[in-house]
């Protein structure tokens, strides 16, 4: 028995956003139907290094796909170590034998499947006529979110982006204009308010531990994808927004401990009754998504192991056909 080894660069060449969006939507549906095993992610906290490590196992029973991802978040890495904030390794497992059939870099998969989750949430929760996007944060995940949203909204008119630094905003504009072949107008703005007010869809991708998007910035009909709050104590939204909104999570257990709702839940500002559904329930048709044009909707993403597993399986299958990677006898 041999294990296929794939670098992250090889994975990047194998995947397209359209197939990742399709696979992640199916994974959400399977979870909504109760056909997956997926314990909440396990955290190790490296407090003295301002970082953490997470383990994420899953088994999608109907699809016969199993994987385990190990992923870190170290915000100081780009400046102090000249390496990415987020890095990951994914082991794809053969459910029949338990053997590791592939081990691959997981950064690209993490970026793409998280972007896919945002576009799927928008598909079910945002208005169909959405034209304007407001981005709070301008890192790699903001780019992934925008590219994925273009799978759902092909005729966006305007994208506004805010970041703490001018250099980050400038780089984001240049990179996304190239990636989107100049089909959309990407505008750097000076404040979060200018990014958010009047937008149809708002995406937050920061590591903030205090609200950035305030209640008075949010108008009727807006949809918000909360991507940055993925650990205990992180939050990007004024909790009063959640009191006004239809709130959808990717997984109740993970979201309640580490998603956008974790801080207001711990303080008693909101309760479980304020959460409408998991996104999988909506994709599976068990609950409704957007019901009115004037609804405010919020999706809080913590990142699910099922997303990684189905995306890794695509990379593995395509690698075998293309003869990419190398086979190594590990066990």
Image (cartoon, rainbow, N blue to C red):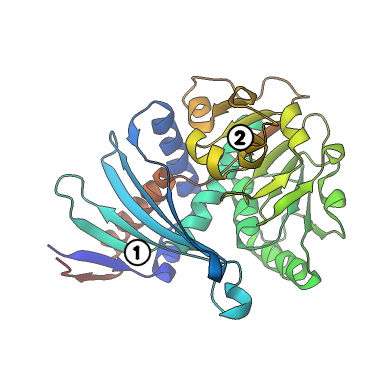
Residue closest to the far left = 1
* Image x and y of residue 272, in percent: 58, 26
Q: Which mark is residue 245?
A: none
In depth, the one of 315 and 331 nearer the eye is 331
Q: Secondary structure at mark 2?
A: helix
The answer to whether residue 174 is above or below residue 274 is below
Identify the residue at image location x=35%, y=64%. 104
In depth, the one of 301 and 113 nearer the eye is 301
Q: Which residue is mark 1?
A: 104
The answer to whether residue 301 is above or below residue 241 is below
Taking the image as shown, residue 34 lies to the left or right of residue 202, namely left
The answer to whether residue 38 is above or below residue 244 is below
User: Can I make out residue 129 in this image?
Assistant: no
Q: How many numbered discs? A: 2
* Mark 1 surroundings within 10 Å by alpha-carbon count, few (fewer than 14), some (14 through 19), many (20 or more): many
Identify the residue at image location x=39%, y=68%. 10
Q: Quadrant location of residue 85?
A: bottom right
Taking the image as shown, residue 278 lies to the left or right of residue 101, namely right
* Image x and y of residue 323, in percent: 27, 67
* Image x and y of residue 107, in percent: 47, 63
Q: Quadrant location of residue 4?
A: bottom left
Q: Which residue is mark 2?
A: 123
* Mark 2 surroundings within 10 Å by alpha-carbon count, few (fewer than 14), some (14 through 19), many (20 or more): some
Identify the residue at image location x=62%, y=49%. 233
Q: Secondary structure at mark 1?
A: strand
Q: Quadrant location of residue 295?
A: top right
């Amino acid at each position: 028995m041999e294990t296929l080894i794939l670098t992250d660069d090889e994975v990047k060449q194998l995947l397209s956003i359209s197939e990742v969006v399709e696979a992640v939507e199916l994974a959400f549906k399977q979870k909504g139907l109760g056909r997956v095993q997926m314990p909440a992610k396990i955290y190790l906290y490296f407090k003295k290094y301002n970082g953490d490590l997470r383990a994420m196992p899953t088994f999608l029973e109907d699809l016969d796909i199993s994987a385990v991802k190990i992923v870190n978040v170290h915000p100081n890495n780009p400046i102090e170590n000249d390496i990415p904030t987020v890095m990951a390794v994914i082991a794809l497992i053969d459910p029949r034998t338990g053997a590791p059939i592939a081990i691959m870099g997981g950064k690209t998969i993490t970026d793409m499947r998280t972007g896919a989750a945002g576009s799927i949430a928008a598909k079910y929760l945002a208005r169909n006529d959405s034209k304007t996007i407001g981005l709070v944060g301008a890192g790699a995940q903001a780019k992934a979110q925008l590219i994925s949203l273009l799978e759902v909204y092909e005729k966006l008119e305007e994208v506004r982006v805010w970041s703490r630094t001018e250099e980050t905003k400038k780089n984001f504009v240049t990179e996304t204009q190239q990636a989107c072949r100049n089909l959309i107008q990407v505008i750097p703005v000076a404040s979060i308010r200018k990014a958010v007010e009047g937008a149809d869809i708002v995406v937050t991708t920061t590591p903030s531990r205090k609200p950035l998007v305030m209640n008075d910035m949010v108008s009727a009909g807006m949809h918000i994808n909360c991507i940055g709050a993925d650990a205990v104590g992180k939050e990007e939204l004024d909790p009063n927004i959640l009191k006004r909104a239809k709130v959808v999570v990717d997984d109740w257990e993970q979201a309640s401990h580490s998603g956008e709702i974790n801080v207001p839940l711990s303080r008693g500002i909101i309760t479980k009754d304020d959460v409408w559904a998991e996104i999988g329930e909506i994709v599976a048709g068990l609950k409704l998504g957007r019901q009115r044009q004037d609804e405010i909707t919020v999706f809080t993403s913590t990142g699910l192991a099922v997303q990684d597993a189905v995306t890794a399986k695509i990379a593995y299958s395509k690698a075998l056909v293309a003869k990419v990677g190398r086979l190594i006898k590990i066990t």
